[in-house]
Structures are given as C-alpha cells and as structure tokens.
Amino acid sequence: MIDPTKEAPMPQATATNITQLGRVIVPVSDQDKSLEFYTGTLGFEVRADMPFGEGDRWLEVAPSADGAAVALMPPRPGQTPHNDQVAVVFTTTDLDADHAALKERGVDVDDPMGGEGPVPRMFFFRDPDGNILLEVEENAA
C-alpha cells in the first residue's frame, strides 16, 4: 500500500543521463560537395569545420544555431556511403514551399504524403550521396 505522507521518488526521464540529441552522423563520399548541398541548397549554417585526428576533418552543419547538428563524415574505413545507413528527419513550418524550392534546385524529392488524421504531412528527399532525408510539417497547435 502507498503511504500518501511520503513523497514518491521522481521518475528518471530516460534510462540513462542522455538529455538531448546532439548530432547525427551522415556518411558522405565528398565532404565539400555535401557541404555545398547542406549550406547552399538547404540553407544550413556551418557549426564546425576543423581538422581532427590524423588528416581527418570534422564538419557539422545545422538549420540554426541551436538544436541538433548533422556531422558530414567519410564512411568508416573499408566502407562506402550507403543510403540505408541513415534517415534524418527535419521539421518544417511550410512543407509545400520547401518541396517546391528543393525540386526547383534539382534535389531528388518524392511527392508529399501523409496529412490524414494524426499523421503529419511529409516528404522524403536525398542528398548527393543518396542518404535518405525526411521533412515533416509541424502541426499547428
């Protein structure tokens, strides 16, 4: 029986001390080409671009100064980028405008889908290495 005079312990938000998503690593074949896509085509900003390790480069981009970033990294040794290695989801406030703009810029985009019931509207598109990206429209509250 629960004793109402004793305070219950606060539940932990997760099973670990993880508090947020910091970044997603996307394997790319050409960091410069990918940088142009993410900054020039998608309008992201560069968060980090610096050497690290033995001749490697740490490159991060993001849609804004806060929130998670996308790290554009060469694949692991002995591997090549595969479009089944990642699926990054971006949130938008205007799905139709973004879809039209990306299509106009020559990006490989699928037709929008969803929007029925609680399912938000969304569309898939691919970066120059064929990595699968998804844009999901925020529902107005």
Image: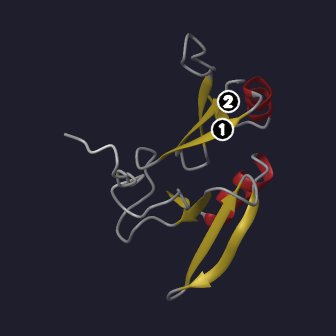
Q: Is residue 64 above or below residue 121?
A: below
Q: Is residue 105 above or below residue 140?
A: below
State the separation of the CA atoms marked 2 and 1.
6 Å
Residue nearer the viewer, 132 or 114: 114
Find residue 87 and report its horizontal and vertical position in percent: 49, 43
Q: Residue at x 80, y 32 (%)?
A: 101
Which image quarter: residue 88? top right
Circle 2 packing at 10 Å, graded few (<14), some (14-19), many (20+), is: some
What amino acid is at disc 2? Glu
**Would residue 9 appear left or right of 31 to someone viewing this image?**
left
Residue nearer the viewer, 105 or 39: 39
Quadrant in the picture for the N terminus: top left
Sequence-wise, the earlier of marks 2 and 1 is 1
Q: Which mark is residue 103?
A: none
Q: Residue at x 62, y 21 (%)?
A: 121
Find residue 113 and report its horizontal and vertical position in percent: 58, 18
**Would residue 46 appear left or right of 15 to someone viewing this image?**
right
Labels 2 & 1 near each other (Cβ < 8 A): yes
Find residue 64 and report its horizontal and vertical position in percent: 76, 55
Which image quarter: residue 57? bottom right
Q: Residue at x 44, y 61 (%)?
A: 18
Quadrant in the picture for the C terminus: top right
What amino acid is at disc 1? Thr
Q: Which mark is residue 138?
A: 2
Which image quarter: residue 51? bottom right
Circle 1 packing at 10 Å, graded few (<14), some (14-19), many (20+), is: few
Q: Is residue 42 above or below residue 35?
A: above
Q: Is residue 28 visible?
A: no
**Would residue 27 appear left or right of 50 to someone viewing this image?**
left
Q: Which mark is residue 91?
A: 1
